[in-house]
Amino acid sequence: MESMTPLFPWLAIVAGYLVGSLSFAVIVSRAMGLNDPRTFGSKNPGETNVLRSGNKGAAVITLLLDAAKGWLPVVLVKWYGARYGLGEGTMALVGLAAFVGHLYPVFFKFVGGKGVATACGVLLGVNPVLGLAAGATWLIMAYFFRYSSLASLTAAVFAPVYYIFGDGVGWYLNKGVVFSLSIMSLLLIYRHIENIGRLLKGTESRLGKKAKH
């Protein structure tokens, strides 16, 4: 049952957005003395572009922190929200807010990344099996095709499908979750429009290729 106090859900959603607005690709790169990921490669402040700097450690740290900022707000609502009347619908909206924060971070002039790692963190928070299924989809596509964007698009399309058909493996459908996951998937696809164009032209950068800078 959702909160009868309208302020609590909104506070949780705003907090989720602010956490999501922490652009760890930029923060980690600055802390490790690397070039700003917004100035080379795809100019996308995300873990894939940090990897193009040649520093795998920075890319792994960015990946984990970007995923954590999607996971943490969701599980906090899941673990402690009931006492404030926050239900599963609010939990999903908080995850969506964290994801939107990554895409349009208030702390970085609303110029953010594409949200793949953060989306995976949100999915893990909603249900670990769901997150692992989407993550496995990404890994399989990335391994065989070597395109991060293609792997991300595939995972984005299948994530809501996994949720809808996943009632037999440990979760049940919630309209608020379906809505949030669907919006998140559409935003992921939208943020990859340029990548789709490059994939069709055969000019998309492959994983592991170091950027020229």
Image (cartoon, helix red, strand yellow):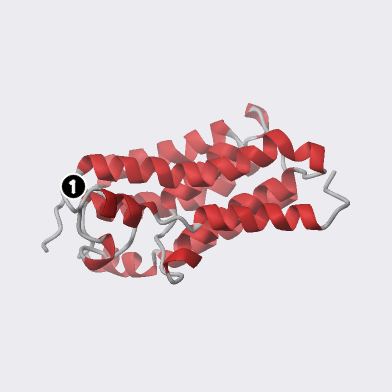
Which sits in the foreground, 53 or 7? 7
Q: Callout 1: few (<14), some (14-19), or many (20+) C-alpha neighbours within 10 Å?
A: some
**Which residue does the numbered mark 1 point to in the structure image?**
208
Secondary structure of the residue carrying numbered label 1 = loop
Q: Residue at x 30, y 40 (%)?
A: 60
Q: Name the amino acid type tagged 1.
A: Gly
Q: Residue at x 39, y 64 (%)?
A: 192
Percent position of residue 211, x then y: 15, 58
- Say whether residue 174 is left or right of residue 108: right
Residue 190 vs 98, above or below: the answer is below
Residue furthest left as drawn: 212
Percent position of residue 84, x then y: 80, 42
Residue 153 vs 198, above or below: the answer is above
Q: Quadrant of the N terminus?
A: top right
Q: Quadrant of the C terminus?
A: bottom left
Residue furthest right as drawn: 4
Residue 106 vs 160, above or below: the answer is below
Q: Residue at x 24, y 39 (%)?
A: 57
Can the viewer see residue 141 in this picture? Answer: no
- Say whether residue 22 is left or right of residue 85: left
Q: Residue at x 68, y 52 (%)?
A: 12
Residue 150 vs 130, above or below: the answer is below
Percent position of residue 140, x then y: 34, 38
Can the viewer see residue 203 in this picture? Answer: yes
**How many callouts does the rendering have?**
1
- Say whether residue 42 is left or right of residue 129: left
Percent position of residue 37, x then y: 26, 60
